[in-house]
Amino acid sequence: IPPYAILSHTWGADGDEVTFEDLNNGAGMDKPGYEKIRFCAEQARQDGLEYFWIDSCCINQEDKAELSKAINSMFRWYRNADRCYVYLSDVSTAKRKVNGDVCEWEAAFRRSRWFTRGWTLQELLAPRVVEFFSRQRRRLGD
């Protein structure tokens, strides 16, 4: 298996994510979840990786046998990835004011939905390198 990046993220609302079926049909570019695919592709390229893997569009969710096998393989896929990009769609690095004070991204980072999901624990522990990114694609740390 060639070196690859893997995306860790939380899924959006029903219909927002680009699915395996969307990719096979040449669809999905107009869905909100496509931004995550674009981000992962561009970040992998910057890191010198030709391949990347994203669960929402690389697993056929309609094929229950494939889905079951994939769920049982997730830890290994994350462990074998060269890099794991955590895309935090609910963390903004854009400066904004609340009650006259400038809000920084750190508070939003600590409250991110990503930290409340059970699946993400293996996505944090398994990879050798884990990097966190805001929805503006700003690297927040590793």
Image (cartoon, helix red, strand yellow):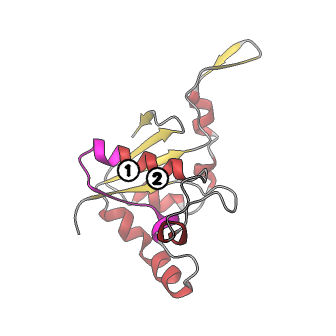
Give the percent coordinates (x, y) of residue 116: 63, 53
* Vertical arrangement, residue 104 with respect to residue 64, above or below: above
**Is residue 49 positioned above or below 94 on the image?**
below
**Disc 1, disc 2: CB below 8 Å?**
yes
Q: Is residue 95 left or right of residue 40?
A: right
Span highlighted in magenta in the image:
43-58
- Count residues near mark 2 (Cα–Cα under 10 Å), then give few for <14, some for 14-19, many for 20+: many
Q: Amino acid at mark 2?
A: Ile
Residue at the extreme bottom of the image, as rendered? 65
Instruction: Please check the rendered image and state whether residue 19 is part of the magenta-colored stretch, yes or no.
Output: no
Question: Which residue is identified by label 1?
Answer: 41
Q: Which quadrant: the C terminus?
A: top left
Q: Quadrant of residue 13?
A: bottom right
Is residue 26 shown above or below 73? above
**Which residue lies most toward the front here?**
26
Is residue 48 shown in magenta?
A: yes
Q: Nearer the viewer, residue 30 or 17?
A: 30
For the point 23% across and 47% down, which residue is it?
48
For the residues labelled 1 and 2, the Cα–Cα distance comes to: 6 Å
Name the element at disc 2: helix
Residue position for label 2: 37
